[in-house]
Image: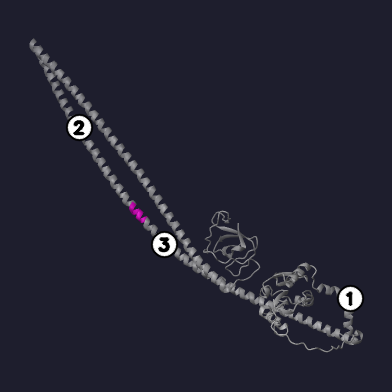
Amino acid sequence: PPYSIARATAFTESYSVEWWALLLLNMAVNFARFGPELKAAYDDVISNSSDTNWALFGYDKQTNDLKVVETGDGGMEELAEEFSGSKIMYGWCKVTDPNTNLPKFVLINWFGEAAPTQRKGVCQRHVNDIAAFLKGAHVTINARHEGDVEEKVVLEKVSKSSGARYGFHKEKARPVEPSGPVGSVYKKADIRADIDANKRDQFWTDQEKLEQQRVAQERKARIEDSKRIDRETKERESKERTIREQRDAERARTIDAQKSREREELRRREEADKAHYKSRMEQLDAETEREKRQAEEARRRLKQQEHEHIGMAVRQTKETVAEREAATQQAEEEAEEARRAVEEARRAVEEARAMRDAEAAAEAEAEAAAAEEAARRAEEAAEQALAEQRAAEEEAEAAAQREAEEAAQREADEAAQREAEEEAQREAEEEAQREAEEAAQREAAEQQDVGYSQVAEAEDVGDNVYGNVESEAPQPQQVEDDSLYGNVEPTGAMDTGDTGDGKLQATAVYDYQAADDTEISFDPGDLITNIEQVDEGWWTGCAPDGSFGMFPSNYVELC
């Protein structure tokens, strides 16, 4: 409700003059704190010996202390770039009047459109003090956006402020007519007589009403601004969330498609490698089988030759033994005949003795002695033949044993050679298998590099289309490398976070909240395990709660 005159008078008289003075002092602009810097910047602009032609002044944080923000020599165009849409600032610039080609000074009171409304109300009281400090301004401009401080607009206002649009250096001299005396209607003012008490009270009442209306309007404007800001914030967040979801869905689709292509390519390569390996093994088996057959044939021929040689030696031995046996038998027969002759001789001797024929007895004895000598020689020949037969048999047995030992040694050597060849063959097969696996891994890595670079290009395109979402925490890095799934080779000085089983671990540096069910959430200090470096900007891993998904790599540090 409107205040009455009495209530307005009581309201104004309820506070002391000191209180009102303190309130006004707290709301006034302060030049004392940065006084030397302010004066130096002002003097540089107005000085003809300095190249500086503009200076920008602003408040120190949320205080009323005026300070120098920036100075320069680039003119109005450079000064216009320094104004901020969320701040209250004052510009002091020296320009050239397009009409007179003389320097003119322009004071710009900049109240940014995004500056707080309450702050605008407080700083509005400082405009006169600023103008008094930056004295000598030819043109004063109240600006809110960039269009108000364009060089063309400022020069146009300077041109209009210079009076008639002509150059005094281009005009010809005109005769000056004499003027008459100048009159005056000045009369000394009597404040008590001029100001009526009722009118004064009414004035204060009207001012109070205006102040209440202004406060109400400002409150309403603040509420509307707050609602508008909340509405714009919600719309922006909704739009950013939609863009982020679209981008994440597109990234997920791209990654899934790339993974599917890579799995298919890897499967084809594995099948090709298996077929190549199988063909190589079959070829090696065929060669091994052929070599085995050749070795078996050689061993068979060698054994056959050995058997033939041994058979020949046995036959020769048997023939020699048969000849010796025949000789022995003949010697035994001769010895038997000799014995029979001896017996006959003895019988003849006996007969001769019986006949007492001395001559016959002597002859018979001689014949008996000759028969005995012949029998003795036959026995010696038989013993010698028997000894030679036994020596031949022993020699044949020794030769057969030597042949058997040599055959056994050759078989042992051949077995050792076969084992060495089989071991060499196994080593060759293992080496071929390792080479095939390494080649498959290299080809898979190369294919991944090619595929990941394509995904990185797709993500870069998506970022250009959707834009970057701003947040207080660091934004996830964009894919700029040619790798997508962790084809990152750490240097010797870098800690890779490898736990020894090929899995990476990292400690969270910032907190992160998942945007959807494909991402994970964590707090600073949480341990992320089983990390797979999907790309340089996004990794996958297990959160402390057991969930698995994607997260930005620059939110964590490898441990």
Instruction: Report the amino acid beneath label 1.
Output: Val
Q: Is residue 284 magenta?
A: yes
Tell me which label, 1 or 3, sits earlier in the chain: 1
Instruction: Report the amino acid beneath label 2.
Output: Thr
Distance from label 1 to label 3 (Cα)? 97 Å
Rate crowding at label 3 as few (under 14), some (14 to 19) or many (20 or more) other CA atoms within 10 Å.
few
Q: Position of residue 237 (x, y in %)?
A: 64, 74
Tell me which label, 3 or 2, sits earlier in the chain: 3
Q: Position of residue 323 (x, y in %)?
A: 18, 31
* Front disc: 1 or 2: 1
- Closer to the camera in the image, 130 or 113: 130
Quarter-of-image position of residue 416? top left
* Front disc: 3 or 2: 3
Of the numbered discs in the image, which one, if any, rests on residue 17? 1
Distance from label 1 to label 2 (Cα)? 159 Å
Q: Which residue is mark 2?
A: 320
Q: Is residue 356 visible?
A: no
Q: Position of residue 317 (x, y in %)?
A: 22, 33
Quadrant location of the C terminus? bottom right
Q: Which residue is mark 3?
A: 271
Badge 3 element: helix
Quadrant location of the N terminus? bottom right
- Closer to the camera in the image, 150 or 558: 150
Question: Magenta: predominant secondary structure element?
Answer: helix
Q: Is residue 277 magenta?
A: no
Instruction: Report the amino acid beneath label 3.
Output: Glu
What segment carries the magenta color? 281-287
Q: Is residue 338 visible?
A: yes
